[in-house]
Structures are given as structure tokens and as C-alpha cells.
Image: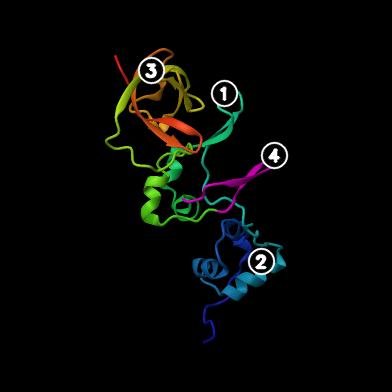
Amino acid sequence: MADSRKRIALKPHMDRIREWVDTGKTDDWIADALGTSASSVQSFRSRNDIYRRERGPREPASVFEGVLDHGERDGWGLWLDPSIADDPIWKEYWAGVEAVVVKVAEDSIVLEADGGEARSADDSATSVATLDGTSDDETSGMPRERGRVKWFDAEKGYGFLVRPTGDDLFVHHSEVQGDPSELAPSGEVEYEVGRNDRGPNARSVRTLG
């Protein structure tokens, strides 16, 4: 069925059309908004060099902050904002990824999945709860021990505790109960000991005294 809507003058709406196109609105959507036909909108765009910007496959749908460890303390690494755990794209595509390929350019760092099978949505809630690389082993009911803070960088979001054995124990801010900035050097803490592929790490950390 032919489009029965009238053709209207689109030139007075040029700025609005350009803005709508930039935000991804379709010709049909623009036509409905202006009360004209999609073919009129398409012709108008062509005549006035209003083109759609192709969205590349790497253009981010979500943006989160991260912190780079430049190797001074715990080796090279990237620590992500824990709120990424709630992102639907992360849950669907990245929650089960075990390793990534890092591609470094002058103005960007690109992470690409390197193998690893995505977990189901039911499993993702556990696996993304700790984004410092900790495994999703259950820690509930594990014995707790006491130690002290060796150092903790609140800006980077991680640090180390000292166990009763004298060994260092990695701690990420997402595992701290309360305010992580309260982890002052030599302060006493209580925690559970978990493990990931880097070794032991502190879980469910709380300050004492």
C-alpha cells in the first residue's frame, strides 16, 4: 500500500533531522515524527549530505572505569569497576571468559576474548561477583583467620594483608566489608582465605578494633 502521508518541507527541520540521524533514529521514525514519508526523509538526507554513521563492532555499548597496575606491586593487571557485574552484556558474553588477548595502541587498549566458554546466566551472578580474577569457589562457612594490613591503595582498590604465617595475602576492595579505606597499615583484620589462579586471596574482610 502506497504511503498516503503528504510530503512536507523538510529544510526547516534540517538540524533536528541531522541530530536524529546522529543518534541512530531510522527514516521511518523521523518520518513519523514529522508527518511525512520515509522515502522523503531518505531523499532529503541524500540531497543534504546527511549520512548515517556506521557503528563499528568495537564501539562500546557500556563504559566502565578501570585501574591499571603497572607492575609496581602485584604485577601487571587491570582491575574493573565492580558495577560491571550488573551489565547485561558482561553477563551474557564475558562472565565465563578465562583469558584475554591484550592489544596495545598509542591511545587505546583493546581486550579480546581468548577462548573460554561463556557460563550460563544462572552461573554468571557468582562468577562476576569478584572482578579481580578470583574464582567463584564457595567460601561460605570457611574458617576465618586474623592478620594485619601490609598496605592498601584505596585509589587502585587493592592491597595485601599479612597472615599469621608471615605470608602476604592479596585483598581486593570488593571483598572488604565496610569502607575499604579503613584498611590502614598494621591494622588488624579478620578474613576468609580463598584461592584463584594467582594463589591465595582474602575474602569477606573486616577490620577489628
Q: Is residue 75 visible in the rendered structure shown here?
A: yes
Instruction: Give the percent coordinates (x, y) of residue 46.
Output: 70, 68
Instruction: Give the percent coordinates (x, y) of residue 15.
Output: 61, 56
Between disc 3 and disc 4, the foreground one is 3
Please tell me the numbered disc located at residue 73. 1
Q: State yes or no: discs 3 and 2 in contact (Cβ < 8 Å).
A: no
Secondary structure, mark 3, is loop
Residue stretch rendered in magenta on the structure? 96-115
Q: Earlier in the sequence, mark 3 or mark 4?
A: 4
Q: State yes or no: discs 1 and 4 in contact (Cβ < 8 Å).
A: no
Please tell me the numbered disc located at residue 45. 2
Q: State yes or no: discs 3 and 1 in contact (Cβ < 8 Å).
A: no
Left or right placement of residue 60 versus residue 191 in this view: right
Q: Is residue 89 above or below residue 26?
A: above
* Quadrant of the image occupied by residue 146: top left
Q: Earlier in the sequence, mark 1 or mark 4?
A: 1
Secondary structure, mark 1, is loop
Q: Earlier in the sequence, mark 3 or mark 1?
A: 1
